[in-house]
Image (cartoon, rainbow, N blue to C red):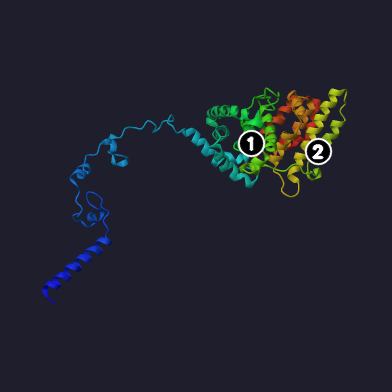
Amino acid sequence: MSGHSVQKKENRRDTMSARVMKAHHKCDELKPRCSRCLRYSEECTYPVPKEESSKLFKPTTDSEISGPLRPTGSIERPKDINNFTSELNLGDLGLLHEWTMSAYTGFVDQPRTEHLWQAEIPRMALKHPFLMRGVLAVSALYKGRMEPDKKPHYLQVAAYHQNLALPAYRYIVEDLDNRMDRENAGAVLAFGHLTTAYAFASPHAPGSILFAGLCASTGVPEWLYLTRGCRKIMVMAKDWISSGPMNLVMRDIDSPIDLSLSPDDHHLAALAEHLESLPISGPEDSEEMDAFREALSQLRRSFALPWQAGDPLSAKFSCFAWVEFIPQRYLELLSVLRPVALVILSYFCVLLHQCGHFWHIKGAAERIIGEMYNILEDDWHDWITWPLQRVLNQ
């Protein structure tokens, strides 16, 4: 083979090797030197055009330097580095965090509802500002209980959020037929539960057995009016709510109840006999007695609900079911402090006392029954002996 042929073959081999190496070390064509040339300390075979090169090596301005590359001595102090007036309301974010960590537990009456109150309610609140305000208000009350030295501050925060939330909620519930829909039904129901908790957790003046804040249209405490509205919401929006996360709070309580299953029913049955011994002097007394009978009948059902066979209801649900079903006339008699109405409410305190492990209800039964004892004349004290023993251990 001639030398020319050998040389030609070697050149062909070198060219092929170069192609293989080029394929193996594919150039990413970064400027001014590609990654491979930087790695192997070689001169890049792709020269940078003069115009592009001038752009690449243009001195960088201060505004183009970001993050830790900029000399720390020249960084201007951000306005919101330690300032709560920035776009992020850190106080509200802290309250939302407190809700997802602890405050929500006051609403979990069964394990299956934990995810609902911890995660689904905040997610729902992102679409409904009035519900978010309700969450923040209740969470602020929780923080106030956990941090007594800061309680005055958190009470103000709670009142601020609640006052902003209530108008939107009232607007919907005052005309449910036209203002409640598939999108807001769950949020409206959830806020009703939050309102009840807010009423219990808020501070109350001595003597306010039913909490402050009368509803202008009904003359009864507003939290009772709003809580009773929850039943109407569930009835009207049953299909909407049953297809959403709030379906977990819906319970069937229309089934027949076996009162004898309740270990406390004999105490309420004895109270019913006492009621029948009271004199009735006219139609007005008869009307009042009918309201008392119905309120006591509903209370006996609530005492028995957790003891029924199958899927029993929690004491907390049973407790507030009574509020939803008592007649309006009974609430009116309660608001004017009729002795029999107060006696029946004292028996309700036994059921409420069983819910004392929920942070917003803790201490409520003791406070209410103590106030009633002070209001009732001595002749009525014997009527509430049993609830006093159960609630106050007296």
Query: Helix, strand or loop at disc 2?
Result: helix
Quarter residue 256 falls in: top right
The kind of residue tagged 2 is His
User: Which percent across, then down, holds residue 325?
Assistant: 74, 34
User: Which percent across, then down, holds residue 299?
Assistant: 77, 36
Left or right, 48 with reference to 322: left
Could you tell me if residue 252 is visible in this image? Answer: yes
Q: Residue under circle 2? A: 267
* Quadrant the C terminus occupies: top right
User: Residue most toward the left?
Assistant: 3
Task: Tell me, yes or no, whether the two marked residues, 1 and 2, touch with CB atoms within 8 Å.
Answer: no
Left or right, 347 with reference to 89: right
In the image shown, does 42 or 281 lie closer to the viewer? Answer: 42
Q: CA distance from mark 1 to mark 2?
A: 34 Å
* Quadrant the N terminus occupies: bottom left
> Which labelled disc corresponds to residue 189?
1
The kind of residue tagged 1 is Leu
Identity of the residue drawn at 57% across and 32% down: 130
Looking at the image, is mark 1 or mark 2 earlier in the sequence?
1
Q: Relative to residue 59, is residue 205 depicted above or below?
A: above
Between circles 1 and 2, the one closer to the viewer is 1
